[in-house]
Amino acid sequence: MSTIIQWNCHSLLSRKPELVRFLTMQTNLPDILCIQESFLNEKISLFSICGYTIERRDRAQGQGGKLVILIKMD
């Protein structure tokens, strides 16, 4: 069974330490994290989380927060 977590983070860059802290406290890492309101855009290309691949739909200037999906690597 897969573990999926959804989070409306409202700025992933500023809340990355909170996400990393959450992940380090887990005995079993979630398989998929669906993150809304990431506020990332094409200028922020180096965002990463250790142990996960990232699929993004980045924010265009003046539009809503957009999405990030983290998929655990085996």
Image (cartoon, grey):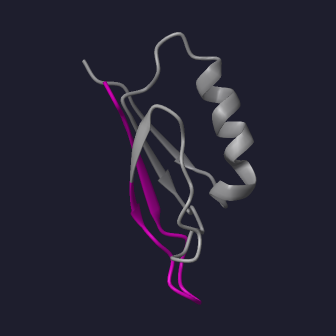
Residue 17 shown left or right of residue 57 in the figure: right
Closer-to-camera residue (16/47): 47
The correct choice, above or below, for 43 with respect to 31 in the image is: below
- The residue lying at 36 percent from left, 29 percent from top is 31
Above or below, 52 against 56 in this view is: above
Residue that lies at the very extreme toward the front in this rendered image: 46
Image quadrant occupied by the C terminus: top left
Rendered residue at 56%/63% (across/down)? 37
Quarter of the rendering occupied by the N terminus: top left
Vertical position of residue 3 compared to residue 64: above or below: above
For residue 7, side relative to residue 69 (left or right): right
Residue at the image position 51 percent from the left and 76 percent from the top? 42
Which of 19 and 45 lies nearest the eye of the viewer?
Answer: 45
Q: Is residue 33 magenta?
A: no
Q: Nearer the viewer, residue 26 or 42?
A: 42
Expressed as whole percent of the image width and height from the top left, the position of residue 60 reads 50, 84
Residue 34 image offset from top left, x and y in percent:
43, 47
The residues colored magenta run 55-74
